[in-house]
Image (cartoon, helix red, strand yellow):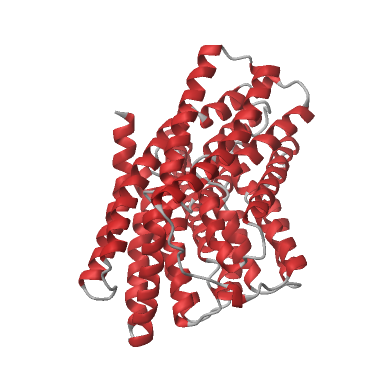
Amino acid sequence: MAFLKKLRDCSFAVFAIIVLVSILMACGVVQFDGDLFWKFIVGAVIFVVGQALFLMSAQTGIMQMGHSIGSNISKFKRGSVVYIIVLLIAFSLTLAEPDIQLYLQEVSKITPSISSFLLLLFFAIGVALFAIFGIFKVTKHIKLKYILLGGYLLIFLLIIFMPAGYLGFSFDASGVTTGAITVPVLLTLMSGISGLKAKNSQDDSFGLVGIASFGPIFVVLIIGLIVGHPDDSLINMGSNATSFLSILGDSAWRSLIAFVPICIVFLVVNFIVLKLPKRQIARIFISVLFSFVGLVLFFVGIYFGFAGMADHVGEQLGNFVNNNSAGWVLILAFMAVLGLTLVFTEPSIGILANQIRQVTNGFIKKRVYLLIMGIGMSIALILGALKIMFEINILYILIPVLVIILLLSFFVQEIFVGIALDTGASASGSMLVAFVFPILFAIASTIGVRIFDYAFGVIALVATIPIITVELLGLSYKIKLKRRKKDAQMSDNRTNEQ
């Protein structure tokens, strides 16, 4: 039953995307390619089954590992041990994130001189180090707004000394390193650690994911200082034709790399501290095995079906823009619909929607949160497409967005700043990275835009604009509380007068 529910949830967005692509082909905007379309449908089915199996079994496998450690964090007597455990978990979880591997596959087309595997390790190190800083924030009760202010100031100081494209590249990396696996586990860890502190434990239970997502930003910026602008002549946007068995073998290897580190960390921690029953450990690792199979199918579906179709759709849309002066209107409409659809594909958004409903005692309902998130993601994708088509420097969009985020952080409650950061860090889902991102890359390549300078930054916008939407929700909640308090005082005054 649980698998069927996940299968239904995962099918919704994929079905919507198939319909959108089919409409574009029926209207003649995208040329029909029978072989590509057949692979796209087969890949979509494999993708849905793999994603559903992965997410279902991850709840009782990898996530259960993190939950077991987070809920028993009080057993770690020394603070230094807690830091080491969080460091290892955050590092391992980043390696297990499917989205980051999909993202690095696209990045390898732009920066082939940099090893994708090394980038993965650097991103994992960045997430782990900033996760430690998130724990330090809890122990010292540092306000998130001050962390935001200091972090963004340092980021803008660094970008003065490097090529423009690295800002979009760095924020994109930040958006994909925290997803369906990392977010739930880090939230549990943060809740367990903040629960040990009597002061402001609820406020401190959010923000770790957002703080951890700063890590990849600084990693990319430091790489930019060292490497400089990549050689655009090496860019190859085409999808290399490979056999199904070759894709299957590569997907199995990627999945193995993803799972081994977190399993080793869990076994070591369990041996030293947790000491869970052998039967429970066996159930966890059976779930991990199913997650492994699901992740393999997930990658196979992407590389066998989605990758080729994404490049094809992007190239055709780019040609449509070149041949039609109003072609960009169609692309913007396409991005708007995709934004409303993608909000339902990311499990982390659903988790945060439930938590924000609980925090506000039902004032902000889940459907309202999802609707506003969908609008925010649509706006982000529209801005991303405009940025590419009109070669707009990401600084002109991202700086105002970050300034608004900082200003709002001083007017909303601390807990909403944390929820907003976590929302932004988890907003970019697999479908965005696997399908929308390559489409925009292909559009940029077809219309002759410098990809490194202008195509990066779409995920960055998806990861930042939702922060504003959540902060605005927090502001409305704060105003509502003040009105309730004022009404209650007026009611008490009338009672006293009577």
Image quarter where the C terminus lies is top left
Q: Going by the image, does 142 lie left or right of 358?
A: right
At which x and y percent is residue 248?
A: 44, 46
452 shown above or below 412: below
At which x and y percent is residue 347?
A: 43, 43
Please tell me how many numbered marks the rendered image carries.
0
Image quarter where the N terminus lies is top left
Q: Seen from this angle, which residue lies furthest left? A: 26
Residue occupying image coordinates x 43% and y 74%:
443
Residue occupying image coordinates x 52% and y 27%:
64
11 shown above or below 70: below
Q: Quadrant of residue 411?
A: bottom right
At which x and y percent is residue 99?
A: 51, 50
- The answer to whether residue 496 is visible is no
- The answer to whether residue 158 is visible is yes
Residue occupying image coordinates x 21% and y 74%:
27
Q: Going by the image, does 172 lie left or right of 132?
A: left
At which x and y percent is residue 92?
A: 63, 38
Q: Nearer the viewer, residue 237 or 287?
A: 237
Q: Nearer the viewer, residue 474 or 245?
A: 245
Q: Quadrant of residue 366?
A: top left
Q: Going by the image, does 340 lie left or right of 356?
A: left
Q: Nearer the viewer, residue 447 or 325?
A: 447
